[in-house]
Amino acid sequence: IPPHVRHRCLEFLEMSFFFLSEDKRNFISIKNNIDILSVQAFYPRLTLLDACRYWILVLRYIMITLITGGHRAGKTTMALRIASQHVNKSYIATAEAIDDEMSEKIKNHQKERDNSYKTIEEPLELDTAIKTANGDILIVDCLTMWINNLLYYKQDCSERIDILCEMLKNINKEIIFITNESSLCLIPGDKESRRYLNLLAEVNRRVAERADNVCLMVSGIALWVKGEKPC
């Protein structure tokens, strides 16, 4: 269910929850977006009211969150804090250990995660990694390095971004994306660096549009600029 539809469905269901009674059978569902009656098809003993309760839970917890901010602003820390309420977690790492500094940074990030995470290292095929990842929640760290890798390996960046954003329209997993806020830095003098920032800004905007929640980290403080903190 697309995020913009999910919010409307959730409001509709929560309102219906208070007005439906156990003997109510004439229920008009928004069948094109979410089929409440299909829940009863799989679980015949569920009442219509129970089916509503079920979908309220589903819509609450299948969400996309984008966490953005500057360098070492606490983005990964916030993502791990949100994911800590889940038992089985997957972590997609897009960075590659290209030098000693990056290797050290990767090791530090690994120390932050406990054994409940399954780490998937994927520098390019992000959409495939997301679709095949298991767990209750998925952290993608990060879009910044993903765009960097696409440019380095001379991939079609616009096509890759299109594929990722199209996939997010019908995703059925809770995902936390981490990225860097590129719009606050100085405009680089060279063409390739400007292209990189433009591509990063594009994927940030498009993922933010699809996301239920967007968090801007400022000096370790979370500012929820869209939606609210998942809990």
Image: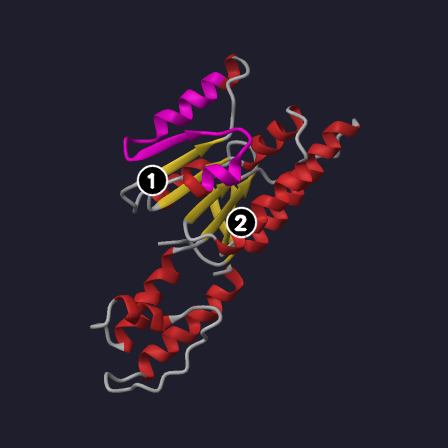
Name the residue carrying label 2: 167
Is 153 situated left or right of 16 in this image? right
Find residue 218 and report its horizontal and vertical position in percent: 53, 42
Q: Nearer the viewer, residue 121 or 15?
A: 121
Which amino acid type is shown beneath numbered disc 2? Met
Q: Is residue 212 magenta?
A: no
Q: Is residue 126 magenta?
A: yes
Q: Which mark is nearer the camera, 2 or 1?
A: 2
Magenta stretch, residue numbers: 103-130
Q: Quadrant of the C terminus?
A: bottom left
Q: Secondary structure at mark 2?
A: helix
What residue do we see at 42% from left, 78% from top? 29
- What whole-number distance in Å separates the C-alpha atoms at marks 2 and 1? 20 Å
What residue do we see at 26% from left, 72% from top? 50
- Compared with 201, 188 (above or below) is above
Q: Which mark is residue 35?
A: none
Name the residue carrying label 1: 89
